[in-house]
Amino acid sequence: MHCPPTKDSPMPFRFRCLAPALLALALVVPAVHAGEPQEKPTGTATMETASVPAWLVGTWTLVRCDNVYPDGHRVELYGPHPQGLWMIDGHGHYLMHIARVQRTPFAAGDKSKGTAEEYRAASLDSNSHFGSIRVEDNRLVTHIDQASFPNWNGRDGKSSFTHDGKQLTYIVAKPSSGSGDGAHGEVVWQRVD
């Protein structure tokens, strides 16, 4: 189903509805951890003090999320028209969600009563994580606090990227699927605000 933009907003309906929830989550996560002692590495800038370029701050919508193989063929990990929202604040906190447009609901209508196939599809058809991001030496440097794929929790990464102010493309050198076959990930985002 396509949700056309309204006269008041260029964003499709699904993003207008999803954006406040993601923003609320992005604001709650730092507040939840505010009372916890924080270990800070010595001799390096932390994410809280690192400069986040103004062009990176804001809301981005997903254009594509593919694995690209050595022979040039692409696999669209979330289908031909994936949906996604990536929100980044001025302190480098981010929240990202990517999903396949057509997702099959659980037959039982109960999240705790899915079949193995339903759980597998739910896992492969969406991807969410939050953490911190900065730019260093012309690379995106990320730390994932929590992810829907638990193997990424606590993971640090560096990705090469290009941007033109309206569109950002970054490369995932070793994606969590397909890298054994020599694939790399290519993720393209379009600025919303």
Image (cartoon, rainbow, N blue to C red):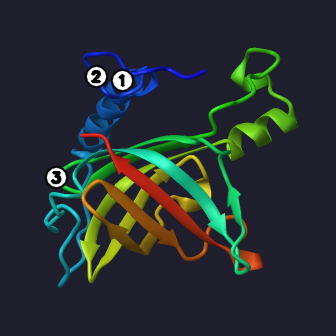
Q: Quadrant of the N terminus?
A: top right
Number of labels in the image equals 3
Reading the chain from its start, which is encountered first: label 1 or label 3? 1
Vertical order, 159 against 106 (above or below): below
**What separation in Å lies between label 1 and label 2 (alpha carbons)?**
8 Å
Measured as percent of width and height from the top left, residue 79 is found at 68, 45
| Image point (73%, 25%), residue name | 112
Amino acid type at circle 2 is Ser
| Image point (58%, 67%), residue name | 185
The circle drawn on residue 90 is 3
Measured as percent of width and height from the top left, residue 139 is found at 34, 77
Measured as percent of width and height from the top left, residue 153 is found at 51, 58
Q: Quadrant of the C terminus?
A: top left
Q: Which residue is mark 1?
A: 16
Amino acid type at circle 3 is Gly
Instruction: Judge the density around disc 2: few (<14), some (14-19), many (≥20) Cα neighbours within 10 Å.
Output: few
| Image point (77%, 22%), residue name | 106
Reading the chain from its start, which is encountered first: label 1 or label 2? 2
Vertical order, 25 against 107 (above or below): below
Vertical order, 81 against 10 (above or below): below
Give the SS element for disc 1: helix
Nearest the eye: 41 or 49:
49
| Image point (62%, 33%), residue name | 101
**What separation in Å lies between label 1 and label 3 (alpha carbons)?**
21 Å
Instruction: Judge the density around disc 3: few (<14), some (14-19), many (≥20) Cα neighbours within 10 Å.
Output: some
Q: Which residue is mark 2?
A: 9
**What separation in Å lies between label 3 and label 2 (alpha carbons)?**
23 Å
